[in-house]
Amino acid sequence: GERGWEYAKFCWRSSLFSFVTLVDHLYGVHMQAGNACVVAMRQQLSKDHPIRRFLTPFSFQTISVNDNARNNLVNPRSMGPRCFALTDIGMDLAWSAAPTLLQSGVEAAKAQTDPKLYWTALLDRGWYIENWVKPRLGKLTPWWEQALEFWNVQKAFVTAFMESYWSGPEALLQDKEAFKFLVQSVSIVQSTSSDAITHLAELPAELSAEIFWDATINLIARYTNLVTAGHEQVGTVPVYAQDASFCAFAWKKGEMMATKQAALNAAVLMAFTSTPMPPLMRKTEEDDWSFLFPSEWKSADVPSPKARADAAYNQFQADLARLEVKYQAFNDAALAADATFPNNFGIWAHVPSLLECSVSV
């Protein structure tokens, strides 16, 4: 209850608010992951390729969104820098440090020497949670447990979709477009990460059909996970920013509230970055994107691929509905009057009905 302690908590919340917005949201989700997959998809996959069709809702408007983010949130003296308590040099230093501050799998890949484990650590979020996060925490918190469960649902969807068009690793290996998509996506991620441990030009020859199959599935699942639950976690922050005394991008030393100008700047920024995107969970027929799945593909070796892909989509939606009930019940219990610490905090980052398919600004 002491003012000094309250001020320290305000500074910590506000600093974390700025850190997550710059590093995890703008750099990690938008500039790195969003750009990597969309650029590789547009350059390496033809318009009717099953993987490109699958990724269409997850990359909806990403190019224009990231272009707006560059012009209005990243460039010097644009809306973003005017919000933060950093000088022009400070902003440059923040962007330079961003690759070293991301914790998303690259740091786990750096520790691997086996090529197969390298790709698994880099792309498989389930492996990352179980084998990298859990040993360091001792046990998984409820947030990490939900993150793992949500990942498993998304990966199962991607796997079932891939199996709708290719019978297995050897069949996919014959698809040169898919191979180039994987290589370019990971190349961009490596080139924008401080912990890249190998030159990608040396890797393709080492990729067996099994590694290529697993890496492709994990890459697609990881991207879809980042732009849905990942973006919800680090990018949906207006609820925090609406109270300038809870946290702020900038404040005067000794004061526990943003200035009027800083509060207005943050409000404008939140309004600018809250454009709606297509929902992940099917609520009406208009939300169904399974019509995008192609009826056939030149390298597909599975009969009736469209019917199989539709079945995978319907199962995914059923899994989302199951998670919706479970996570809403979790939040109801956390918000109950008799809830006790540490079980009195709701978690909304993985509630399917709140998630969008692609990154908004």
Image (cartoon, helix red, strand yellow):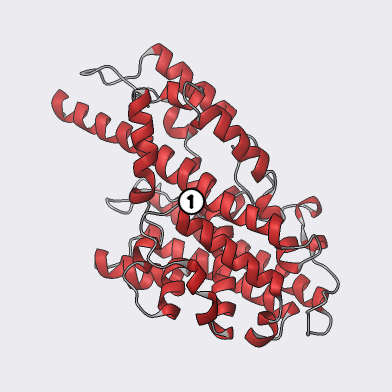
Identified at 62% across, 62% down, the residue is 321
Residue 16, quarter of the rendered image: top left
- In-image side of 39 versus 205 (left or right): right
User: Residue 39 location in percent, x, y?
Assistant: 64, 53
Of 110 and 62, nearer the camera is 110
**Is residue 55 at least partly visible in the picture?**
no
Quadrant containing the N terminus is: top left
**Is residue 360 at least partly visible in the picture?**
yes
Of 27 and 349, nearer the camera is 27
Residue 322, quarter of the rendered image: bottom right
Residue 58, quarter of the rendered image: bottom right
Identified at 70% across, 62% down, the residue is 44
Q: Give SS at disc 1.
A: loop
Identified at 67% across, 70% down, the residue is 178
Residue under label 1, please give it. Answer: 349
- In-image side of 314 versus 10 (left or right): right
What amino acid does circle 1 point to? Ala
Of 247 and 189, nearer the camera is 189
